[in-house]
Image (cartoon, rainbow, N blue to C red):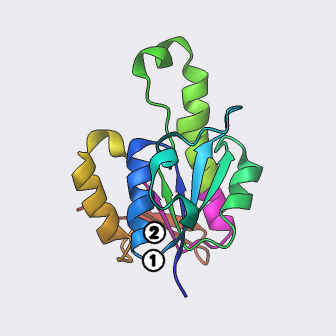
């Protein structure tokens, strides 16, 4: 049985490339795009594997939706983030809601749905090629940046190498 992956922020440049890579490696991929009234999937519009993925349109700021989309998932790659730094000074609440609360929503939903692995990706500090190399390695390894232990009721943090 192939692994089931959820990629948040799949409509971005890095998320779309990660989507292609995981599909090529045999994953069943759910690709989350931010909902918009045009039903535009961003960078996913042009991927060759579009027919082989399940595209979801929604928002990580909704904890109920996060719980729904993390069901029946083995690994989550969380790439969703708002990155327009100048605007964040004008409207900081939307950045806190998306980047902090949205991350919390995904992590809690993954924990509640017994997702094996949840990767929070801080891609704004990495080169894209390096990110893809690391993502490929992490998709095969059990050492995680965040791993939840339901028996102890807390998470543990590892190192990114």
Q: Secondary structure at mark 1?
A: loop
Q: Is residue 53 in view?
A: yes
Residue 31 placement (x, y as % from top left): 56, 56
**Mark 1 sits on what residue?**
26
Observer-nearest of 153 and 62: 62
Assess disc 1: are there few (<14), some (14-19) or many (≥20) residues with their C-alpha within 10 Å of its C-alpha.
few
Cα separation between marks 1 and 2? 5 Å
Viewport quadrant of the C terminus: bottom left
Instruction: Give the magenta part as a residue range.
Output: 107-120
Horizontal side, residue 119 vs residue 94: left or right: left
State yes or no: discs 1 and 2 in contact (Cβ < 8 Å): yes
Image location (x, y in percent) of residue 47: 45, 53
Front residue of 4/94: it is 4
At horizontal 50% and vertical 32% (from top left) the residue drawn is 82
Question: In front: 132, or 144?
Answer: 132
For this orientation, the residue located farthest to the top is 90
Q: Residue furthest bottom?
A: 1
- Where 58 falls versus 19 (above or below)? above
Residue at disc 2, secondary structure: helix
Residue drawn at point x = 57 percent, y = 63 percent: 51
Q: Position of residue 112 (x, y in %)?
A: 69, 66
Q: Is residue 153 magenta?
A: no
Q: Is residue 121 visible?
A: no
Give the residue at mark 2. 23
**Corner quadrant of residue 160:** bottom left
Q: Residue at x 61, y 69 (%)?
A: 153
- Residue at the right extreme? 64
Residue 118 is one of the magenta-drawn residues: yes
């Amino acid at each position: 049985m192939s692994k089931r992956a959820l990629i948040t922020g799949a409509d971005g440049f890095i998320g779309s490339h990660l989507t292609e890579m995981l599909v090529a490696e045999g994953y069943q991929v759910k690709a989350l795009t931010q909902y918009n009234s045009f039903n535009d999937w961003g960078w996913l519009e042009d991927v060759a594997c579009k027919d082989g993925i399940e595209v979801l349109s929604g928002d990580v700021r909704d904890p109920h939706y996060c719980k729904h989309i993390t069901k029946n998932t083995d690994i989550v790659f969380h790439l969703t983030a708002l990155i327009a730094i100048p605007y964040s000074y004008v409207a900081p609440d939307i950045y806190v809601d998306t980047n902090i609360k949205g991350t919390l929503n995904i992590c809690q939903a993954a924990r509640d749905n017994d997702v094996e692995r949840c990767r929070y990706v801080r891609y704004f500090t990495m080169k894209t090629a390096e990110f893809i190399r690391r993502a490929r390695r992490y998709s095969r390894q059990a050492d995680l940046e965040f791993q939840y232990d339901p028996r102890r009721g807390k998470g543990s943090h590892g190192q990114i190498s």
